[in-house]
């Protein structure tokens, strides 16, 4: 067994041009070669060759379980991923693995590794440095930035520096310092990666014209939980209060996040 694990899921980084457009086809070994990175230190697992737009509950469960069963075996894990849903995967993995002793780096690229001027080499090489930096927890490495996995947000689709950190905190690998951050485990919640994800969660973002019927839909469609992105720091319009109270009394769990 090698010291480090690479889990490849697909994404633009592994794409080549075909008559059907860009398709994820090249192997992680080829990606490392194109990025001038020695693959001899890595065990490589191909979980899928998927455009991250098509990542679903099943694939996320597999990724969580593979990562969970590997954190005690390796000194670091590198995940190659498409950029479009990278922030969702990074948040999820942060919830499970931020407390682990090893670094989990997630990277991809806006241009295929094999195309000229691709951002893949800088992203992969920075991610590899992160694996050896002594940091632990989950990080997104992309566009010259290292961002806490729970904070990375994709904000551009037309440039290689496509991500920013929601709290504007970036990690320097020259003097790596853990950011102020309390893993969920220290808040008394130990997520069990073997349990699998609950897919019946509704994501609700308010708009001023939204009516009460959205809550009837959530109930009728048997959603188990609802994450509300409230206005500002978490504002909820008064017209929704009673409905939310009724549904939570019926057992639907509501969680709030801010608009930002
Ligand atoms: N659609 C691609 C994906 O998310 C975009 C990318 O990787 O940049 O897999």
Image (cartoon, helix red, strand yellow):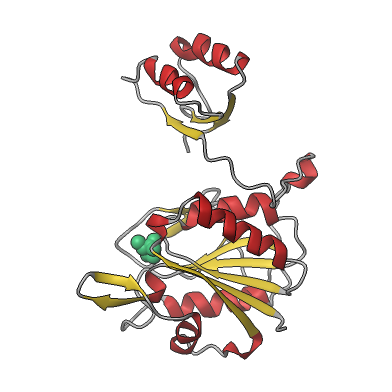
Q: Where does residue 19 sit, x and y in percent of width and height?
A: 19, 74
Q: Which residue is drawn at the image coordinates 69% and 56% (left, top)?
A: 97
Q: Which residue is drawn at the image coordinates 34% and 20% (left, top)?
A: 210
Q: Which residue is drawn at the image coordinates 55% and 48% (left, top)?
A: 167
Residue 14 picture quarter: bottom left
Ligand 1 visible in quadrant = bottom left
- In this orientation, which residue lies closer to the viewer: 43 or 240? 43
Q: Residue reaching furthest left? A: 19
Q: Where does residue 100 sit, x and y in percent of width and height?
A: 75, 60
Q: Is residue 223 visible?
A: yes
Q: Which residue is drawn at the image coordinates 58% and 59% (left, top)?
A: 62
In the image, residue 21 sits, relative to residue 250, either above or below, namely below
In the image, residue 38 sits, relative to residue 249, either above or below, namely below
Task: Assign the N terminus to one quadrant of the image.
Answer: bottom right
Q: Is residue 152 visible?
A: no
In-image side of 115 versus 257 (left or right): left
Q: Where does residue 247 sit, x and y in percent of width and height?
A: 55, 16
* Count of numbered circles in the view: 0
Q: Where does residue 249 sit, x and y in percent of width and height?
A: 62, 14
In-image side of 33 versus 7 (left or right): left
In the image, residue 159 sits, relative to residue 246, either above or below, namely below
In-image side of 190 versus 33 (left or right): right
In the image, residue 217 sits, relative to residue 16, either above or below, namely above
- In this orientation, which residue lies closer to the viewer: 175 or 110? 110
């Amino acid at each position: 067994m090698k010291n480090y694990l690479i889990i490849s899921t697909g994404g633009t980084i592994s794409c080549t041009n075909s008559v059907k457009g860009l398709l994820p086809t090249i192997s992680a070994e080829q990606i490392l070669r194109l990025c001038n990175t020695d693959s001899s230190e890595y065990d490589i697992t191909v979980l899928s060759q998927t455009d991250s737009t098509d990542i679903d509950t099943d694939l996320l469960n597999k990724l969580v379980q593979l990562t969970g069963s590997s954190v005690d075996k390796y000194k670091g894990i590198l995940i190659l991923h498409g950029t479009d849903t990278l922030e969702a995967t990074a948040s999820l993995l942060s919830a499970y693995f931020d407390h682990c002793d090893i670094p989990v780096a997630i990277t991809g690229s806006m241009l295929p590794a094999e195309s000229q001027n691709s951002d893949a080499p800088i992203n992969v090489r920075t991610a590899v440095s992160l694996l050896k930096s002594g940091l632990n927890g989950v990080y997104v490495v992309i566009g010259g930035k290292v961002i806490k996995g729970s904070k990375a947000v994709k904000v551009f689709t037309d440039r290689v520096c496509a991500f920013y950190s929601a709290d504007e905190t970036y990690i320097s690998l020259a003097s790596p310092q853990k950011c102020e951050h309390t893993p969920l485990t220290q808040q008394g919640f130990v997520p069990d990666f073997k349990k699998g994800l609950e897919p019946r969660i509704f994501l609700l973002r308010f708009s001023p014209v939204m009516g009460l019927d959205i809550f009837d839909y959530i109930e009728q469609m048997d959603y188990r939980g609802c994450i509300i992105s409230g206005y500002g720091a978490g504002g909820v319009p008064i017209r929704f209060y009673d409905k939310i109270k009724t549904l939570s009394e019926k057992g639907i769990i509501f969680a709030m996040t801010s608009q930002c």
